[in-house]
Amino acid sequence: MAKTILCIDDSPTIRLLVRKTLEPLGYTILEADDGKTGVETARKASADFVLVDVNMPIMNGFDCVKMLKTLPNYSSTPMVFLTTESGEEKRNQGRELGVSGWMVKPFEADALVKIVRMLAG
Ligand SMILES: [Mg+2]
């Protein structure tokens, strides 16, 4: 079964890069452009892995992850932040939410593939 990756990011460029990196490897990509839409998308379709930006309009990545964790079929879904934020304080905030990782933009395609393969299978 093809694995489904949900990419929640307000940057169309990042979403495109993620799609271009993962789609050729057989992953199905779902996109959302803010945290609220991300939660709505997650409710409708189940994903095997979630990539979340931190800074987004309407609902930021931290609130988005908090909401996702309350959905029964996302309680153990691996989630990784993909963000321009690299400060220790933000990272700790992310860690406290129980996410599996933190990647800093701009990202290397190889690094993304590695983490997705490791966590989504
Ligand atoms: Mg952003």
Image (tube, rainbow, N blue to C red):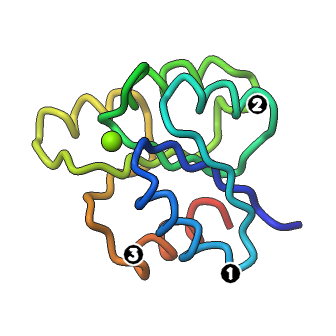
Quadrant housing the C terminus: bottom right
Label 2 environment density (alpha carbons within 10 Å; few <14, some 14–19, many ≥20): some
Residue 71 vertical placement versus 11 (above, below): above
Residue in the foreground of this view, choosing between 103 and 19:
19
* Furthest residue toward front: 12
The residue pinned by badge 2 equals: 73
Viewer-nearest of labels 1 and 3?
1
Q: Provide the residue designation for mark 3.
A: 111
Asked whether, in this view, residue 58 is left or right of residue 120, the answer is left
Mark 1, other Cα within 10 Å: few <14 / some 14–19 / many ≥20:
few
* Left or right relative to 30: residue 109: left
| Mark 3 touches mark 2? (CB < 8 Å) | no
* Residue 111 percent across, percent down from the top left: 39, 75
State the CA–CA distance, disc 3 to disc 2.
26 Å
Q: Between disc 1 and disc 3, whose residue precedes?
A: 1
| Dot 1: element | helix
Instruction: Tell me what residue is drawn at x 51 percent, y 64 percent.
Output: 16
Vertical order, 84 against 76 (above or below): below
Task: Tell me the tag on residue 70.
Answer: none
Provide residue 103's location: percent of width, then percent of height: 32, 57
Q: Secondary structure at mark 3?
A: helix
Local crowd size for mark 3, using a 10 Å CA cut-off: few (<14), some (14–19), many (≥20) = few
- Residue drawn at x 70%, y 33% is 41
Lower position in the chain sequence, tag 1 or tag 2: 1
